[in-house]
Image: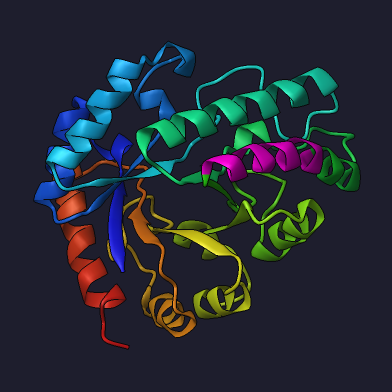
Amino acid sequence: MNFAICNETFQDRSFSEQCQAAEAAGYTGIEIAPFTLADDISLISASEIASYRAAAADHGLQIVGLHWLLAKTEGYHLTSPDASVRLATTDYARRLADLCSNLGGNIMVWGSPQQRSLEPGWDYGESVERAVEVLRPAAEHCADLGITIAMEPLARSETNFLNTAEETAALLDLVDHPSLQLHLDVKAMSSEQKSLGDLVRDNASRIAHYHANDPNLLGPGMGEVNHTPAAQALHEIGYQGWISVEVFKYEPSPDEIARQSMEYLQKVYLGGY
């Protein structure tokens, strides 16, 4: 398995320094949150993109793709009843896909709970239909670039839309496009009734990407969740994608989190199952 880390873990540093830190901790991939590159992705120049690619390559890293797609943006929403907002969201997803492709990535993790949550009075079924309207043309654009959108179920503490892998799989069935698949995140998986292993096995044909972390917002192995059942299941299904560390707290330090997470990944996810 290949191990990556999300670049905002080191967001107080230049991208080159982020890559240096990832390499030092033993990672071979880096996953990018667009807001760490620019407040407005349209302002990222071709020369800047080239410098990001060069920095990753210089440190032996592959740019995996993008996540936190709609974080720190305005005017975008997956389920809004406003058709103009949905059109803008699809257009932004296309521009993110262009950026992802130019960076050399091939995965876009669609989480963004604030930009998908339903407001009071919004019908769930109608909201699903609106999400399909946004995602299908976005997936079609991604297909031309060799990019997969990985939809992320999130816990009810974060959003009221797509809280389980089962709900997310139902949406994928409606969109019915190979460039829209499933993302699994241990923090979110831990909020489900099913076990980690069952969630992996039940969605074996859909999993495009995987985040390793803990509900305490730190890295894998830094909380109470035992990742072994998920790791075993990933081996069983022959998962060939990335295991990417995504954290939301940066104490005791980003470098220590990266180090401890890597030790746990090597111990548990490379356990020789």
Task: Tell whether 79 sits left or right of 35.
Answer: right
Q: Is residue 143 magenta?
A: yes
265 vs 86, nearest the viewer? 86
105 versus 243 height, above or below = above
Location of residue 116 in the rendering, given as x and y in whole percent from the top left corner: 69, 37
Left or right for 151, reference 197 = right
Find the residue positioned furthest to the bottom.
273
Q: What residue occupies the far left of the structure in this picture?
A: 24
User: Which stretch did the figure color magenta?
Assistant: 131-145
Q: Residue at x 21, y 75 (%)?
A: 267
Residue at position x 13%, y 39% in the image: 58
Residue at 62% across, 77% down: 202
Horizontal and vertical percent position of residue 196 = 51, 74
Q: Quadrant of residue 76?
A: top right
* Quarter where residue 120 is shown: top right
The spot of residue 254 in percent (x, y) is 20, 42
